[in-house]
């Protein structure tokens, strides 16, 4: 399709706030899992809220040397998805986000608390680096993605953000691509960030 917006289909959960912790990699992965869960009809709604903190704590080389991520020091979406594929991911209420690394422990779930947890059971697919490959993937479901963050991204206040191809960057940032438009003169991506609803 020439346009896709998963927000309009109720498949994008609410925007979260990662705070001063470089946990965008965990937020991007969890947002993709939440959207996939909703699209697959497995329950939930835009209010589905899975635990980023569990990934931050447990997808770490301090827990398992196969992981390369460094909790609040930045990480890899692939580590987060690999962790969830091998383990169950709790609801946020059972492992709430605290914006810092904690030791990896099973989430504490009181007998009075209900909710679901999820586990990835299908194969993870890496999307090619072309615009066309990303567009094809986003037409199927929102996609965890990486971009180079320039000062313009930090200063963004709304509307369409235009970035120069060779802008000076302040490092990488993981987001969720939830849509796109190729019709008209303005072609754009729609992203869900993890810098709070005011971004």
Image (cartoon, rainbow, N blue to C red):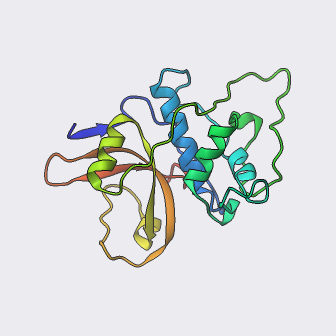
Instruction: Look at 58% across and 57% down and name the residue there.
Output: 76
Residue 14 visible somewhere in the drawing:
no
| Pick the front one: 80 or 173 | 80
Q: Is residue 156 above or below residue 178?
A: below
| Pick the front one: 129 or 118 | 129
**10 on left or right of 5:** right
Instruction: Look at 83% across and 20% down and name the residue there.
Output: 112
Rendered location of residue 14, percent (x, y): 53, 39
Q: Going by the picture, which residue comes out furthest to the bottom?
A: 168
Rendered location of residue 91, percent (x, y): 69, 33
Q: Is residue 164 above or below residue 50?
A: below
Rendered location of residue 157, percent (x, y): 41, 60
**88 on left or right of 123:** right
Quadrant of the image containing the N terminus:
top left
| Quarter of image, res 39 | top left
Q: Is residue 132 above or below residue 167?
A: above
Residue 130 visible somewhere in the drawing:
yes
Rendered location of residue 12, percent (x, y): 46, 36
Instruction: Look at 45% across and 68% down and name the residue there.
Output: 149
Q: How many marks?
A: 0
**93 on left or right of 131:** right
| Pick the front one: 62 or 42 | 62
| Quarter of image, res 86 | top right
């Amino acid at each position: 399709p020439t346009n896709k917006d998963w927000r309009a289909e109720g498949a994008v959960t609410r925007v979260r706030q990662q705070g001063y912790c470089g946990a965008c990699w965990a937020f991007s992965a969890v947002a993709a899992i939440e959207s996939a869960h909703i699209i697959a009809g497995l329950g939930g709604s835009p209010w589905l809220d899975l635990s980023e903190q569990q990934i931050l704590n447990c997808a770490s080389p301090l827990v398992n040397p196969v992981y390369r991520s460094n909790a609040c020091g930045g990480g890899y979406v692939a580590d987060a998805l690999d962790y969830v594929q091998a383990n169950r991911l709790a609801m946020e209420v059972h492992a709430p986000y605290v914006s810092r690394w904690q030791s990896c422990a099973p989430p504490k779930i009181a007998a009075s608390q209900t909710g679901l947890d999820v586990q990835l059971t299908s194969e993870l697919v890496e999307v090619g680096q072309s615009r066309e490959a990303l567009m094809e993937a986003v037409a199927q479901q929102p996609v965890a993605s990486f971009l180079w963050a320039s000062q313009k991204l930090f200063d963004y206040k709304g509307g369409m953000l235009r970035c120069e191809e060779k802008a000076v960057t302040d490092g990488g940032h993981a987001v969720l691509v939830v849509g796109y438009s190729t019709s008209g003169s303005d072609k754009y991506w729609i992203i869900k960030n993890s810098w709070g609803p005011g971004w």
